Image (cartoon, rainbow, N blue to C red):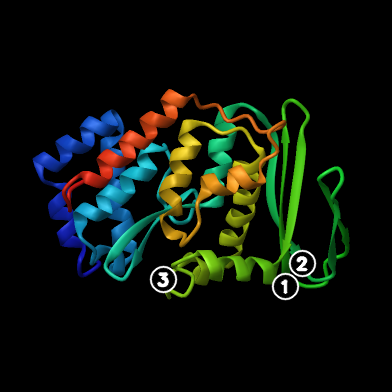
Amino acid sequence: MTPNLPAIQKTLSSPNVIARIESRLGEKAGTFITSVLDLCGEDNNLAKCNPNLVIKESLKAAGLDLPINKNLGFAYVIPYGNKPQFQMGYKGYIQLAIRTGQYKHLNAGVVYEGEEMIEDRIKGTLEIGGKKTSEKAIGYYCYMELINGFQKAIAWTKARVVTHAKRFSKSYNSKTSPWKTDFDAMALKTMMLQIIPKYGPMTIEMSTAMTSDHADFKGFNPQEEIDQNANNEVIDIDMSDDEKAEIEAQEKKEAEKPGPGF
């Protein structure tokens, strides 16, 4: 057993905590509690964190109906020092995109040594030429096609991904960062974020995910990225002014809540 696990076990056995979780998740509360215990049981550093903060960050994934099992790659709760932090996985973004019902194809992948990324910058499409000669990653790509026929592809070299991560990710140099434990997964997520918010249909759920996830990004405003890079003729952001105001109000309310509750 993880040495620090009793702290989270005690918190999750509290009737008040259970009641608050049930009020948010209903019949999924039991599965959520088991998932959090399993997560902390596998990560002693996470088990050392404040249990209420671990639960709060885990609820962000549950609110998006995404599992926090590390092996699945949909969403994570990562300990940075003694502070747990929710992060989306690239598979989580794929899942949220599928739920919109507007994507025909959405794929991200690795380009290996011996292969060549051939971009058609006029059409916004991509081909992978050459033949893989090793398992060494030299680049990453993401491709989307909507039901209405619109296509977009983007590819970056590995060096460009590293430069971007060093610039924007506060956790890049952390020993526990996914950048250190699973670089390829984080690189694929980075490519997703160059496609989905700029060219793809957006929902409140996806906007919420990106807002929560970008807590890890320094000096990076996802809405500013959208405004600067979006093609207004192809992006369909399915959010009214009232919905945007509601999200902003919810975020302000969360920020004003006294800690360390959830």
Q: Marks 1 and 2: in contact by CB < 8 Å?
A: yes
Which numbered disc, 2 or 1, marks the residue that appears first in the sequence?
A: 2
Q: Is any atom of residue 48 visible in this view? A: yes
Helix, strand or loop status at disc 3: loop
Q: CA distance from mark 1 to mark 3?
A: 23 Å
- Identify residue type, mark 1: Lys
Q: Eyeballing the image, is 2 above or below 54?
A: below
As drawn, the label of residue 112 is: 2
**Amino acid found under the numbered disc labelled 2:** Tyr
Residue 183 drawn at (x, y percent): 57, 67
Q: Which residue is mark 1?
A: 136
Tell me if residue 139 comes above or below residue 145 in the rendering: below
Around disc 2, counting alpha carbons within 10 Å, would you say few (fewer than 14), some (14 to 19), or many (20 or more)?
A: many
From this view, report whether residue 149 is shown above or below residue 165: above
193 relative to 177, above or below:
above
Q: Which residue has dot 3 on it?
A: 176
Residue shown at 84% from the left, 50% from the top:
121
> Is residue 44 found left or right of 243 in the rendered image?
left
